[in-house]
Image (cartoon, rainbow, N blue to C red):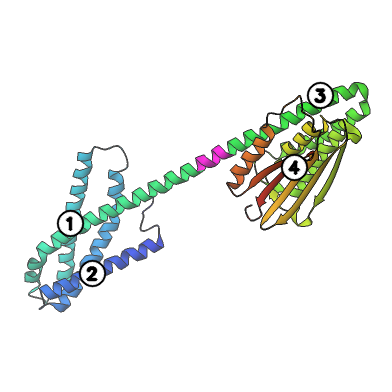
Amino acid sequence: MKHPILSNNVRHIVWWLVWLFLAAGQSLLFYFGYGKFVTVSILDSFVSVVIYSGIALSLWFPFRFFNSGEIRVTALISNLVASGAISVTLWVLITKLLMTLFLPEQNNYQAYWLATLPYRVGTGVFMYGLIIMTYYLFVSLSNLSEKNAKEARLESLVKETELKMLRSQINPHFLFNSLNSISSLTITDPEKARDMVVKLSEFMRYALSRKDEQPVSLQNELENLRLYLDIEKVRFGDKLVTEEFIDGNCLEFKIPVMLLQPLYENAVKHGVYESTESVKIITHAKITDGYIEISISNNYDPSPSLKKGTGTGLLNVNRRLELFYGNKAMMKTTKENGLYTVNLYIPTDYL
């Protein structure tokens, strides 16, 4: 740890202001107690305080040495007492030496010195205690700051790990479905299988090229999702229809990478796959009241489904929203009149 006073300009200034205040207080006390020596009182006070302030600054180094490792309490106390005794003794002797040099003609300075000596020693011990307490305070604040920084880094690491885990659940799910479709198409329609492989490679290139959790623009995300839907259109043909209504102001807005992917997968899985009729997936995006609202809706077969979903996709999306935005973002789902809709509300001023 660096010197808490010398390494900070503001603390350095405050440090000297405090010592100047102490010098003024001591000179007034000496003046009222020993009024015959006005000039001597002022000069003596400022010289002694300047000397002690220098000693106090140097005390940081033995203080850090005493507290640098495991040490018994008794040994620590002994070291602090010894350094205090040495500091006060040096302060008293150096002050007397300098004042004798400054005021050689003052015959009464020796009497003045002897009269103020008990006060000097008591003041020196008191100020030494304050200095040590101040240094302990700086060490405690530094340790607390380091602890908070470590906790913040750990929390960030845990969040990043969880985000990567949630995202890793998306790619295999889609990849397995696509490979199964390609496997079937290689027999029934090799040309479509080839088309799916090309689009799948482009899609996976986008997904794998973003290994971190840095947000991407909505425009990039939509371009990648169109690749996904194109792959599914090869699989389902005219049964899958898509529409987009995107406000141009939304395109540069940043969102977590592949945040929307599970929502489209759900639309295909529970809408297109289970329906005998054509299914339309409609995407809306607009900015209202400081939020970007992204809406993904699809019609579905209202008859009871034999295949119930696990809810993993929606849970992943909701959890990623919480990790990125806290409680500032929201996901809402509605299901009515044969239309299933997912609405995301993300604050525009967050990323």
Asked whether the residues under the numbered discs 4 and 3 touch, taking CB atoms below 8 Å apart as contact, a structural biologist would say no
Name the secondary structure under disc 3: helix
Type of residue at label 2? Ala
Packing grade of label 1 (10 A; few <14, some 14-19, many >=20) is some
Asked whether the residues under the numbered discs 2 and 1 touch, taking CB atoms below 8 Å apart as contact, a structural biologist would say no
Query: Which of 238 and 94 lies nearest the eye of the viewer?
Result: 238
Mark drawn on residue 125: 1
- The mark that comes first in sequence, 2 or 1, is 2
Q: Write the residue at 42% across / 48% down.
A: 145
Packing grade of label 4 (10 A; few <14, some 14-19, many >=20) is some
In the rendered structure, the answer to whether residue 350 lies left or right of residue 99 reads right
**Residue of label 4:** 341
What predominant SS class does the magenta segment belong to? Answer: helix
Residue 124 position, x and y percent, is: 18, 59
Q: CA distance from mark 4 to mark 3?
A: 28 Å
In the rendered structure, the answer to whether residue 305 lies left or right of residue 72 reads right
The answer to whether residue 103 is visible is no
Packing grade of label 3 (10 A; few <14, some 14-19, many >=20) is few
- The mark that comes first in sequence, 1 or 4, is 1
Name the secondary structure under disc 1: helix
Residue 214 position, x and y percent, is: 65, 45
Type of residue at label 1? Val
Q: Which residues are magenta?
A: 153-159
Single out the mark in the foreground, 1 or 4. 4
Mark drawn on residue 23: 2
Mark drawn on residue 180: 3
Name the secondary structure under disc 2: helix
Q: Is residue 154 magenta?
A: yes
- The mark that comes first in sequence, 2 or 3, is 2
From what the image shows, is residue 150 above or below residue 303? Answer: below
